[in-house]
């Protein structure tokens, strides 16, 4: 089966910023993304979990996008404008997709 190179971008951000981020991605031309709840983790502020916690830790989301390499800089600029002043992590990895025409 033939695969095609792409970039997978994952953005972990406070839930209250989800709409601002997804709006910015759409405005930047990103045609698809997936939003997932984040259950817990560990970072600069230490370990946290959503279970029973009524705090900013209880409201994190992961936004995952897969784009062609030539769309990456535009996506990252849009994401950074939102993430820059808030809690958030942006990661980029190379990936392979089966149906390149969808990205």
Image (cartoon, rainbow, N blue to C red):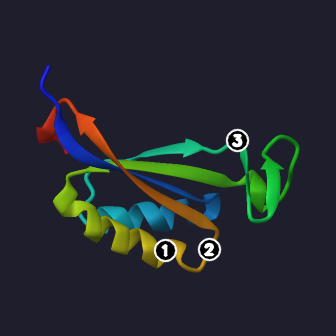
Q: SS at mark 1? A: helix
Image quadrant holding the C terminus, namely: top left
- Is residue 60 depicted above or below 50 in this figure? below
Label 1: how many residues lie within 10 Å, few (<14), some (14-19) or many (20+)?
many
| Residue at 82% over, 58% down | 46
Please identify the quarter of the rendering in which residue 59 is found: bottom right
Please identify the quarter of the rendering in which residue 16 is found: bottom right
Q: Position of 2 compared to 53: left or right?
A: left
Observer-nearest of 79 and 69: 69
Q: Position of 10 compared to 94: left or right?
A: right
Pinpoint residue 12: horizontal percent, then vertical percent.
Answer: 56, 56
Label 3: how many residues lie within 10 Å, few (<14), some (14-19) or many (20+)?
some
What mark, if any, has residue 39 been given in the picture? 3
Label 2: how many residues lie within 10 Å, few (<14), some (14-19) or many (20+)?
few
Asked if marks 2 and 3 touch (Cβ < 8 Å), the reply is no
Q: Position of 98 compared to 93: left or right?
A: left
| Label 2 – label 1 distance at C-alpha | 7 Å
Asked if marks 2 and 1 touch (Cβ < 8 Å), the reply is yes
The residue lying furthest to the front in this view is: 94
Pinpoint residue 99: horizontal percent, then vertical percent.
Answer: 16, 32
What mark, if any, has residue 86 been given in the picture? 2
Pinpoint residue 36: horizontal percent, then vertical percent.
Answer: 54, 42
| Residue at 27% over, 62% down | 72
**Residue indicated by mark 1:** 82
Pinpoint residue 50: horizontal percent, then vertical percent.
Answer: 78, 45
Q: SS at mark 3? A: loop
Disc nearer the start of the sequence (2/3): 3
Disc nearer the start of the sequence (1/3): 3
- Is residue 90 depicted above or below 98 in this figure? below
């Amino acid at each position: 089966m033939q695969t095609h190179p792409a970039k997978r971008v994952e953005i972990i951000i406070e839930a209250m910023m989800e709409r601002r981020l997804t709006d910015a991605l759409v405005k930047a031309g990103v045609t698809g993304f997936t939003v997932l709840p984040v259950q817990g983790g560990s970072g600069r502020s230490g370990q946290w979990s959503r279970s029973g916690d009524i705090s900013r830790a209880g409201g994190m989301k992961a936004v995952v996008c897969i784009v062609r390499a030539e769309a990456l800089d535009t996506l990252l600029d849009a994401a950074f404008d939102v993430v820059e002043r808030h809690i958030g992590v942006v990661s980029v990895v190379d990936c392979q997709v089966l149906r390149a025409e969808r990205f």
